[in-house]
Amino acid sequence: MDLIKPRPFETTDRAHADIFNEVIERLNENDEQIAKRADEAEQNAQTYLDKHAGNKNNPHGVTKDQIGLDNVDNIKQAAKTEFDSHVQDVIRHITDIERNKWNGAQLFKITSDSGIHKINLTSGSFFSALKDVGTVTFYGTNAVEDTPTNGSLRGMQLVGQKGIGMGYAVDTLGNAWWFYYNTVHTAINWFPIESKSSSQTKADTALSDAKKYTDNLKADLTKTTWLYPVLQNDWVNYTDANKVRYMKDTTGTVFVEGAIAKGKVGFEIPAFELPVGYRPSRSFQFVGVASQIGMSGAPQHHRLLVDINGRVIIENCSNTVNPNEFISLGFSFKAG
């Protein structure tokens, strides 16, 4: 903008109005030019500012670090429809029912995070490790003090109340056990669980042993060794074919048989004595056949006593004429 300078006054000028008016007009023209140029400058500045403001290409080269965005990723903002879709996504967001279910779920783990046993023992005792920990899975090597096996053991404990536990375990050899302990116990009680094969093996063994026992018993029962007592108080064998004899079988049963005569009948008068091992645990009496000679052919009997000292005593005979003519023996008892 070119400003018009007013003419300076000369010493020859006279103070006329036309000269002053000319100066005023030029000043006014300058003011109008200044105002016009100011409007143009303001308009140009606004245009430049608007253009600058619309430039999104970072004309000043401002970095993220300068404005504190160095840790922020430059990711496109999602549209509102995408936000609404995300809010309504029930797969990514849980419901109140699911939240309450999870909050109310059991917090105690019975396995490790990987799903294997929770308790891993290579020493110590199962009892110390399992008591008071609740329902849990466990593993122990054969170095554990109270293990029931020579192999490693895996199992699970079930607990109904504090201090009382029970469970089961299987070892690497294929054997199985169940166990329990109570509040008064100081150790675990292990009990083997029979498998089909082990039960059959035991049954076969028991049957075999029973057959052997029966066969041996049968052989022993048929094997007899008769012994002959020394007769006392004038008693003699009735005949050599009917000598008094005794024996004991494998069941511990003592057999006495034969016939005697001529001796003394009465209390505390033994006909003979049985040795130790062939005596009863309690005294008993026996009634046998006696001679009927002198009694008009009527059958007669006698009563004898066998006491715990092995004494065989003919206490009484119904044949009052010939009481010691013939006394038949044939009784048995369990040795005491």
Image (spheres, rainbow, N blue to C red):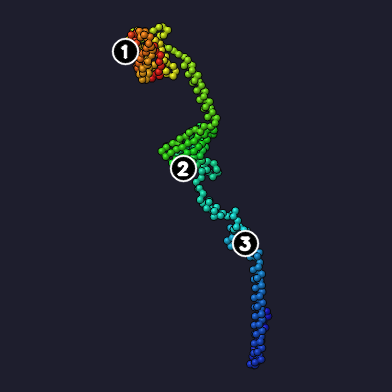
- Residue 77 image-quadrant placement: bottom right
Q: Which residue is drawn at 53% across and 43% down?
A: 112
Is residue 149 shown left or right of residue 35?
left
Q: How far apart are marks 1 and 3 (CA)?
A: 129 Å
Tell me, yes or no, if residue 82 can be seen here: yes
User: Residue 194 versus residue 157: which sits nearer the camera?
Assistant: 194
Residue that protrudes farthest toward the right in the picture: 2
Residue 127 position in % (x across, y down):
45, 38
Of the numbered discs in the image, which one, if any, rests on residue 80?
3
**Which residue lies under the disc numbered 2?**
160
- Residue 37 image-quadrant placement: bottom right
Q: Distance between the residues labelled 2 and 1?
A: 75 Å
Is residue 334 shown left or right of residue 45?
left
Going from the N terminus, do you reach mark 3 or mark 2 first? 3
User: Residue 7 versus residue 323: which sits nearer the camera?
Assistant: 323
Q: Which residue is drawn at 49% across and 38% down?
A: 167
Secondary structure, mark 1, is loop
What is the quadrant of the N terminus in the image? bottom right
Q: What's the amino acid at mark 2?
A: Gly
What is the quadrant of the C terminus in the image? top left
Foreground mark, 2 or 1, reads 1
**Which residue lies under the disc numbered 1?**
266
Going from the N terminus, do you reach mark 2 or mark 1 first? 2
| Disc 2: CA contacts within 10 A as few (<14), some (14-19) or many (>=20) | few
Q: What's the amino acid at mark 3?
A: Lys
